[in-house]
Amino acid sequence: MERLVGTVSRGIRAPIIREGDDIVEIVVNSILNAAKQGDFKINDRDIIAVTEAVVARAQGNYASVDHIAKDISDKFGNEDLGVIFPILSRNRFSTCLKGIARGSKKVVLLLSYPSDEVGNHLADIDTLDEKGINPWTDVLSEDIYRNLFGYYKHPFTGVDYIEYYKDIITAEGCEAEIILANDCRAILKHTKHVLCCDVHSRLRTKRLLKNAGALTIYSLDDILTTAVDSSGYNESYGLLGCNKATEDTVKLFPRDCQRVVDSIQQKIYEQTGKHVEAMVYGDGAFKDPIGKIWELADPVVSPAYTSGLEGQPNEVKLKYLADNNFAHLKGDELENAITDFIKSKGDNLVGHLESQGTTPRKLTDLIGSLCDLTSGSGDKGTPIVLVQGYFDNYTK
């Protein structure tokens, strides 16, 4: 009988992981023990994914507010500092902002509006239309914003982020000024020393600022790229991808992840004889249709993965084949025709009508998003995900 189950994504429970733990050993043992208990087998081309959070925890990749403050002070000196385009996330940015303020005498905080880069709103876009505000050209002071919109609390968190971020800055004895704009160059009327806090648009932002005459330009991926007084660090992403650990520390994005995934792959092969793929994943890349929040606050979905996860899907659309190429067939004839078509498809379907509507994204972005949804971000206790059958198709 033909197999009726396709892709399966399993959240795998693991012990609470602490600094110094052997993350590779924990992942491998958790997978093998779950397979025994759950009565399933490990197969070739299964995917073992582990969330970046527990990799960083095992590495002890943490930094304090004082570490951040020292790096900011070393890079910007005593200049008024423009801090531009941060995302509106207490988990992602509040502790970073505390360190930034502690290392500065004045912070001019420039917020994008009506929302930040990942979709957290400071105002309703329909309200902008009603009040005749053009967010692409209009620069708003804090007073103008308050006169227009009052105190706007985020519908998910109940936080007025302008007030919240301003209070963080002033609590550090640092002077604070808030402006709202979507052109990064608006900050240059206040200071020519800028820290870019956007995630995915940071390279363009830095280029625009440099061409417009900024004197000192860094972004979050330039902060804590090396250890400061024995702190954690990330040579590639700095503070990008960090999360709040305590009120005074952040957990940084993990480093040296390629060794982790390669070791998982090797140990599974040694113990099962199966060649699996492995990856470290962070935020998935998807958008909430209600809150309009784009989940991806990490710099990448996957900082490391084994070579079999390189590339993107090469798939045809079954419904297109059924409605077009083989519309005259039904039953076994239709199934056989579609099966033969899939078996003979080329290695590159870009531009082919049969592939329209398939998802032209990196495999690691798709699989990482699946894993992020599977593991959740709360108390499921499943920081490891086993994905099976992902590379199967209708013919398997």
Image: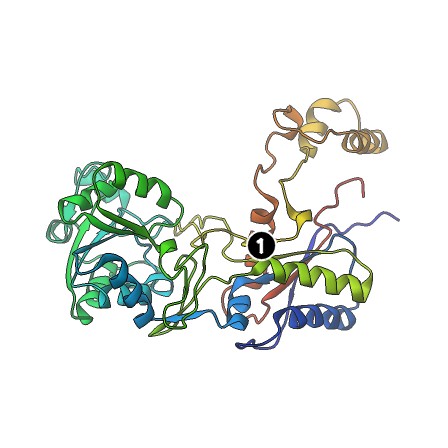
Colour treatment of the image: rainbow
Q: Nearer the viewer, residue 204 or 383?
A: 204
Looking at the picture, does residue 387 appear above or below residue 68?
above
Q: Nearer the viewer, residue 269 or 168?
A: 269
| Residue linked to disc 1 | 304
Residue at x 19%, y 42% (from the top left corner): 186
Residue at x 38%, y 62% (from the top left corner): 224
Residue 23, image quadrant: bottom right
Residue 47 shows up from this direction: yes
Q: Residue farthest to the right?
A: 1
Q: Nearer the viewer, residue 329 or 287?
A: 287
Image position of 55 (left or right of 347): left
Image position of 350 (left or right of 77): right
Looking at the picture, does residue 81 appear above or below residue 129?
below
Residue 304, image quadrant: bottom right
Q: Amino acid at mark 1?
A: Ala
In percent of width and height, residue 170 lies at 17, 67
In percent of width and height, residue 303 lies at 54, 54
Residue at x 31%, y 51% (from the top left corner): 218
